[in-house]
Image (cartoon, rainbow, N blue to C red):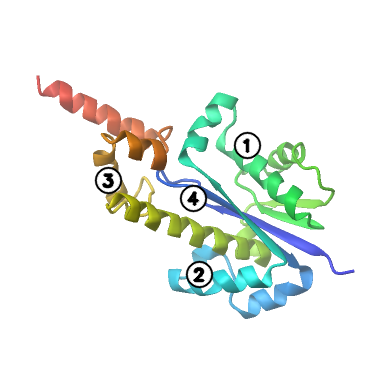
């Protein structure tokens, strides 16, 4: 009997703007060769154009796939339920496993403590299957690489949609992006933008707010 393998990965854990996108892509284990032939690998190893080309092909090749988007608001609210970001991801990963029902689930583990993450995840998994939690699984397992491509393309499209909706350039959404920081310095005054698109729990946001407050005080 041919086993089914579920690759799970995410895009957008670190950005201060936009959704966290989590993807599960389910394949027959015999599909690994096909994925290799079309050029699937960790999304970070591919150009944006190549990721776009592979996006629909991967979804067609998969038995099933599921995309979960976690909004900035939900990310900010994690503290209210005493959950950190890794734990929030584990809960979403379990949701993918329970719905897609693989024989084997391979997860790109967000924590260096893979055993601890695995144990936390297991308490939310209802489907009986083998679970592998590995660092750099997107590099070492092609099914996870496929999931990473879907996640990255979806995340990037979400950022472009935000730009279109608000009529402003926001960059990649990462704290290290000067364009993103410039946008945040303006967005801090806009309650709607801050509520819908920005992760207010990020240190970057608090720093900008503090700097604005200090600047205001210095005007007196």
x, y percent for residue 18: 43, 47
x, y percent for residue 146: 61, 65
Label 2 residue SS: helix
**Which residue is denoted by mark 3 in the rendering?**
183
2 and 4 marks in contact (CB < 8 Å): no
3D distance between C-alphas at marks 2 and 1 = 28 Å
Q: Give above or below for 55 relative to 138.
A: below
x, y percent for residue 21: 54, 51
**Which residue is denoted by mark 4 in the rendering?**
12
Drawn side of residue 141 relative to residue 47, left or right: right
Circle 3 or circle 1, nearest the eye: 3
Q: Give above or below for 158 relative to 121.
A: below
Q: Which mark is residue 87?
A: 1
3D distance between C-alphas at marks 2 and 4 = 16 Å
Q: Earlier in the sequence, mark 2 or mark 1?
A: 2
In this orientation, which residue lies closer to the viewer: 179 or 136? 179
Q: Earlier in the sequence, mark 3 or mark 1?
A: 1
Label 4 residue SS: loop
Q: Earlier in the sequence, mark 1 or mark 4?
A: 4
């Amino acid at each position: 009997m041919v086993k089914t393998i579920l690759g799970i990965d995410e895009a957008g854990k670190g950005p201060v703007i936009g959704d966290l996108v989590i993807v599960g892509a389910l394949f027959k284990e015999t599909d690994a060769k096909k994925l290799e032939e079309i050029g699937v690998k960790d999304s970070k190893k591919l150009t944006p154009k190549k990721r776009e080309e592979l996006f629909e092909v991967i979804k067609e090749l998969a038995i099933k796939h599921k995309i979960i988007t976690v909004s900035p608001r939900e990310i900010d609210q994690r503290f209210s339920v005493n959950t950190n970001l890794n734990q929030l991801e584990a809960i979403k990963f379990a949701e993918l496993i329970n719905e897609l029902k693989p024989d084997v689930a391979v997860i790109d583990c967000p924590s260096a403590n893979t055993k601890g993450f695995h144990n936390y995840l297991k308490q939310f998994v209802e489907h009986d299957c083998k679970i592998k939690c590995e660092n750099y699984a997107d590099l070492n397992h092609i099914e996870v690489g496929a999931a990473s491509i879907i996640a990255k393309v979806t995340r990037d499209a979400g950022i472009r949609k935000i730009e279109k909706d608000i009529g402003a350039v926001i960059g990649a959404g990462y704290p290290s992006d000067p364009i993103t920081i410039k946008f945040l310095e303006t967005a801090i005054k806009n309650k709607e933008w801050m509520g819908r698109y920005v992760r207010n729990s990020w240190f970057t946001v608090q720093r900008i707010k503090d700097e604005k407050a200090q600047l205001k005080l210095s005007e007196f």
